Image (cartoon, grey):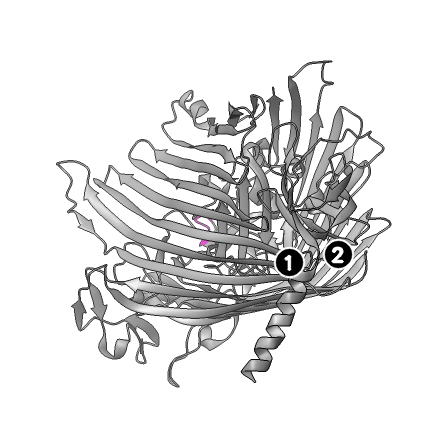
Amino acid sequence: MKKSFSVLLFFFFSFLHAQDTYNLKGVIKDSANNENLTGVNILFPDLGTGTTSNEYGFYSIKIPEGTHTITVTYLGYTSVFREISVTENTTLNFELEEASESLEEVIITEDVERLNIRKPEMSVNKLEISTIQKLPVLFGEVDIVKSLLLLPGVSNAGEGSSGFNVRGGAADQNLILLDEATIYNSSHLFGLFSVFNPDAIKNLKLYKGGIPAEYGGRVSSVLDIYQKDGNSKKFEAKGGIGLISSRLLAEGPIVKDKGSFLVGGRSSYAHLFLKLTDNDNSAYFYDLNTKLSYKLDDNNTLLFSGYFGRDVFNISESFNNIYGNTVFNLRWNHILKDNIFTNLSMIYSDYYYGLTLDFVGFNWNSGIKNMNIKYDFDHYVNENLELNYGLQSTYYEFNPGEIEPNSESSGINYEELIKKYAFESAAYFSVNHTFSENFSAEYGLRYSTFFRLGQEELNLYENDVAVRYNETFGIYESVDPISTKSLSKSKVERVFGNLEPRLAMAYSFNDDQSVKVSYNRMTQYLHLITNTSSPTPLDVWAPSGKYIEPQLLDQVAIGYFQNLKDELYSVEIEAYYKDLKNRLDYIDGANLIANDAIEQVLLSGEARAYGLELLLRKNKGRFSGWLAYTLSRSEQRTPGRTEIEPGINNGDWYATGYDKTHDLSFTATYDLSEKWQLSSNFIFQTGLPTTYPTAQYRFEHLTIPVYSERNSNRLPSYHRLDLSATYTPKKKRNGSFESSWNFGIYNAYNRMNALSLTFRQNEDTRVNEAVRLSLFGIIPSVTYNFKF
């Protein structure tokens, strides 16, 4: 049997090598600035085959010996048609020029946003920065995260909330990457803005399902964002001046056509106007983006990128809050062989939270750091088979909190919560396989391991139970530890290992119609300790360990995709189901702040989410845009561990704090003339779940409210209309300076959407009443943008 198998392998590989085929590879760039172009189509019409460039602009394909016509197309750029003769392995680079199109021709130029029928990729949304910059936004500040909220399956926990929710998942279940580095808090000013400077961003992808095997560590979604490389041909600068913030970005060559730099900064300054009114309060943010790239030779490129951002919030100089992200990434792109592209990355990420209370007399510091090394391979076997594989390792340091006196008169003693450490590693292998003209698949496997390392002091409990149910009072309560143990951080306290299979398949009926299905299992070893639906800067991250199990998710999705009228319109319909194990829940009255024994307030439950998504796009013409609708449900439950325990909410399913039954958004852009462009958004959402009191009783002189079941009520429905107009003066002949004015109205009909509802007794009438808290009414804005 072994001999027969060996003979079969011999003939198989002999057949492969007998073919007179050669490898054609290269890099595709923008001719104006040498930016790598992602997703460019490289086609051979006479062979009926082709490929696309990866995120670094690299492509590789095997073709037979002979003379062939190659076509390179990327919407928004002039297509290249060239006849080439292939007699050996060949390197062929391309520089594409931006196409100049009249107003009556194609207006939408974002090729990455168009629907690809034949690829197995599904549950993925892509937006070009040029599209995002057209949308009406709060205070005129272009915002990547808020633009994602206009897509199906993506929402947030209300105005002024940080983070975003994907297909019924929590905000901490999203993996957010900026040049491969993890961003732990994606918001400025408690959710009013995102940390991403749009001028510095090249492209982005949001994976809601069918997540490739190279990604791991979160169970809901992956937001993968890449910064621009910088212009290696000439110096350029761009920026914008708004009512409350401004930005400036500069890029240019270090060595022409070989090395480039990019540096950009943003800052808000609305707090300065408060100083004019003798108001000592302030709230502002600032951030810095940077990137350096250098091409050593045709096969090697070095890149260094970084981000630094901070939010500052203080009240009368007695309360001071500073928090933000710091990330760095050093990358080496190497073409190992003609058909193997590699990327080695060394990454540092740090999220810091600091708080000073002068009236109490202490400083508080907390945060999370990680150091990550990853090595990824793109292996182009032939025109029908692409392999992606790699290794990743991450070391974590968790600082739950450190308190120290900030003056000699302070009555606070120094105290440090116990730091925690962990090490996560993973290996993955993925195959992108075209079986036939109509059927293709992407399948792979990821194996992740998580090592919870030792700490100075670990509580030990009888039977390893840190929470018990008190039958007498009918409540859950904390258990006192029976002892503690200490273990060096170089030792392993507990090990987790999980297989994470991934599969996506597409069957196309023709060039304009297909069905797709996907399945993925994801594991999340980190947990955000918060009992709010929207994360706050004070929330802390905790690793899985002795008392916390990793979250395990299984998601399946099926979709129908169609292009209509020569891609004038496109339709995407997807249904999904998500099942999640080991979702953390909290006992009533849980204290999460500065809690060194957090396991004493945690219970483990489960969650599920399911829904239907619709995305209808108009891709061409003076009028373009999309309609997005999501019908969904997001629930969780925590049943009792024994027959006498009721669990949380009597062990019944209840809506999560970010569940929205209906989520509708309509986005439109109209090119009125060469100088004026109009845009609008309309959003309607079911109100968020909440818990209202249903009765009250008096005990002595106290009024005690009686609440309904958890999240059994809802806030009023949310809706608003945003409008904007952009004026672009005609560019002077041979002039390099460009500018535009953006005029916007957020919440045009002044809808006072409820952020929360509270109940109180009217002091005059003594009648109970509900009080609505609203954050924003109508807000006009104006922003001046420039480029030279």
**Residue 577 seen from this side:** no
Give me the residue at 65% from left, 31% from top.
Answer: 744
Q: Is residue 739 left or right of residue 221?
A: right
Left or right for 36, reference 623: left
Q: Is 762 in the magenta?
A: yes
Q: Which residue is painted at 61% across and 67% down in the image?
A: 503
Quick check: can you spot residue 368? yes
The x and y percentages for residue 308 are: 41, 36
Q: Which residues are magenta?
A: 760-764
Q: Which mark is residue 117?
A: 2
Position above or below: 783 against 314? above
Above or below — where is 553 with respect to 386?
Answer: below
Q: Nearer the viewer, residue 543 or 713?
A: 543
Residue 411's place in the image compared with 673, above or below, is below
In x, y percent, where is residue 132?
Answer: 64, 38
- Residue 226, percent across and down? 54, 42
For residue 766, what is the image quadrant? bottom left
Kindly report which numbered mark, 2 or 1, lies closer to the viewer in this rendering.
2
Extreme residue in the left direction: 408
Question: Is the C terminus in the top left, top right, bottom left or bottom right quadrant?
Answer: top right
* Marked residue nearer the N-terminal end (2 or 1): 2
Q: Which residue is mark 1?
A: 123
Towards the viewer: 426 or 184: 426
Magenta stretch secondary structure, dominant = loop
Q: Residue at x 61, y 37 (%)?
A: 137
Q: Amino acid at mark 1?
A: Ser
Instruction: Please name whichever residue, 551 or 50, is drawn nearer the observer in this view of the structure.
Output: 50
